[in-house]
Image: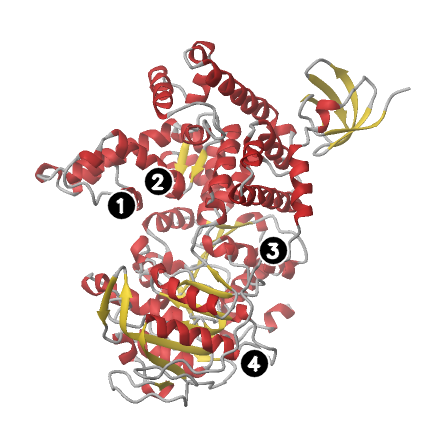
Amino acid sequence: MNYLERLNEEQRKAATHVEGPLLILAGAGSGKTSTMTCRIAYLIKEIGINPYNILAVTFTNKAAGEMRDRVEALLGGNVSMWILTFHAACLRILRSHADVLGYSNDFVVYDPTDQKTVVKNICKEMQLDKMADTKKLTPAYFLSVISDCKEKEWSPKQFASENGAGFDYGGRTKIIADVYEKYEAILRKNNAMDFDDLLLNTVRLFERDEAVLLKYRNRFKFLMVDEYQDTNRVQYKFIKMLAEENNNICVVGDDDQCIYQWRGADIRNILEFEKDFKGTKVIKLEKNYRSTSNILNAAHSVVTKNRQRKDKKMEAAKGIEGEKIKYLRADDEKDEASYVASEINRLHGEPGEDGRPLEYRNFAILYRTNAQSRTFEDALSKRGLPYRVLGGLRYYDRKEIKDMMAYMRLVQNPSDDLALARIINEPKRGIGDKTLEKIRAIADFRGTGMLRCLMDGDVISSLPQKAGAAVTEMTGCLKKYAEEKENLRVSDIYDGLLRDTGYFAALEQQNTIEAEGRMENLLEFKSVILDYEKEDINLSLSEFMEKIALLAEVDNHDENEDAVVLMTLHSAKGLEFPVVFMPGMEDGLFPGWRSIEKEGGLDEERRLCYVGMTRAKIRLYLLSAAMRTLYGKTDFTRESQFLQEIDRRYMEGDGVYVPKKRTDEGFGYAFGSGGGRPDGITQKEPYHPWAAQTSNFFKDSKQDVKAPASGSSLKLAVGDAVSHAKFGDGLVMEVSAKVVTVMFDSVGIKKLAKDIAPLKKLNAAE
């Protein structure tokens, strides 16, 4: 049990707790992941609990992956237990039981972009743009209300009832309820769920079918929940329903880090845990292994101004006092950004906490709103400093990637009308909006999906000849891969769709820089697929699509990329950096005016400030601007009240609310009227991350995509020895014009579509 010796006393108490409910109050940087993974190892190795009977859930793929890796390292091999995000766990349950709720088990998951498209189409159908007083009812607003309704378990009718539809003189409530109802109907018709549905439908499943609930209660005798302070009402019900009989539930969280109430997190879940589960043992982890004493004490002095919190105080485990927090009051947002860039330039290469030189990836700029990033991007670019914005356009949200994922979704689920509407004219097939509406109307009348409708010769004959031929070719392609998806790797399906749909060829014909960039992205997506196939050689199309759909933005943070990280404070939760800059410390921006006016809003902003400050390991900078231009409006500002709440013993630099003359001393940079920019700053060459790439790889990859499947050109005969990319070696038993039957050593007899089967001939029969 030497793994337990690495834990401190309180961590060890938590890790060796077995029976009954346990609440671990784990402050920032207190080693909660080590504690949780050691507890799982202890239950399995020392107590003899079957891994099959343990469920551990968290909020991000990154956290789940890290926990799984650590558990396997402790146990010395692969562990067959569920260590998943809430959404992934619910998705896995629904994949086996969605039919109870009226879905087929191969339902698709709509991401935020898909949801927005659905709502946009509904708004267009309802002609909301032509109605008075509906300009503020944007798709984002509707989706926010719908998400809120699902977290409260409200149907469209319940929403209307709760919001006084009978007194809805402006018609606003009725419009929202109608949009919500149409939205749900479209998802049902398309055999689709959104992220909120994954949670809500699992709870509904448990409520509707007691046998299913008992099945998972009997399986998961031990539950562990990470970041419990961030759970919403539906997640709370999901956990409580599973835990009620065995009562062996361990939750880990920190009420001081509850920062997602705006999206449904309920801080009462952790504050009232002892009431929900009688006999709860409470263990506090109050040793911080990340930050210096000055940073922790300053953060503590802010968060203790909240009244609703459990009493605890973090102490630096290393006992290092460290540098005081530096505060700067800049003239405006440009001076603020310029100072940050110059400090990064100055500190880069200096010794860090472990004596190694600070790299660019060791610096983070954490801001309250995405709109603040622009000035920092400009300032970093001027100095040639590499940076990465987390929270910008996701790779998977790029048009060409969304298009190909839509094709793949149709192979998986032919009922997905949203996916079909996206790609029916990508590449151009002569299908305009009017023709698409006509197809949709026919499908609605027949009560079937649009793709199935397009496989009807009568429907095709009603289209213009050229369009009809192009659509027939497309539907034939989709049908071919849908029928063969179990016999093909995901990469085979992807290559085939790129080639046979004409998508890649259409980009090549454009012969533009933009088109070449899109082709590069499509080839990179092939690399993504191959990476997943390396992890799981039996990866199915549906499993791959699930993994991509469940990716969160924080999962895209590459800790090894040497670039300054720019992100919102919300996105930074769970991360840590040696040097952190927190700009925009001004009333109205942080805390925001809306939070000041909202009940409990100021407390949440204060917790967000605490989270931001405790991301820093050795240096923390707080900044504000005397004058700021944001959203096209310039205003004089007042310093954030959070600055006033920080104990002055832990800060240095400009005085809060006390004007004083700035000098080059202390910060090494002068700001203020007449200060100007110091001379002698070395300008580096602009950073070009793709400059080192050669065009040969791109050309070779394009040829790989355009090459037809190996089976299409093979001349096969009975008795030929062949090798299949997915099934391995086999012997040809029968050959027809379109189908080849092979006896494989690994899976037995398989009938394969001859023209797309990834086969290679080893030798011909004599």
Mark toward the start of the polypeptide (2 vs 4): 2
* Quarter of the image where the N terminus is located: bottom right
Pointer 1 and pointer 3: residues touching (CB < 8 Å)? no
Badge 3 is on which residue?
48
Q: Secondary structure at mark 2?
A: helix
- 10 Å neighbourhood of mark 4: few (<14), some, or many (≥20)? few
Q: Nearer the viewer, residue 100 or 282?
A: 100
Question: Image quarter for residue 725?
Answer: top right
The CA distance from mark 2 to mark 4 is: 46 Å
Disc 2 crowd, CA 10 A, few/some/many (<14, 14-19, 20+): some
Specify the label residue 141 is tagged with.
1
- Mark closest to the chain's N terminus, 2 or 3: 3
Tag 1: residue type?
A: Tyr
**Residue at the location (42% across, 77% down)?**
620
Cα–Cα span, label 3 and label 4: 49 Å
Q: Residue at x 28, y 83 (%)?
A: 656
Residue 407 appears in the rendering: yes
Q: Looking at the image, can residue 207 be seen?
A: no
Q: Where residue 689 appears, x then y in whole percent?
A: 57, 59
The three-letter code of the residue at mark 2 reads Lys
Residue situated in front as seen by the camera: 467 or 280: 467
Contact between labelled residues 4 and 3, with CB atoms less than 8 Å apart:
no
Identify the residue position indicated by label 4 in the image: 350
Closer-to-camera residue (753/59): 753
583 or 716: nearer the viewer:
583
Residue at the image position 40 percent from the left and 80 percent from the top: 677
The span from disc 2 to disc 3 (Cα, nearest Å) is 48 Å
Residue indicated by mark 2: 116
* Alpha carbon distance from label 1 to label 2: 10 Å
Residue 147 higher or lower than 317, as above or below: above
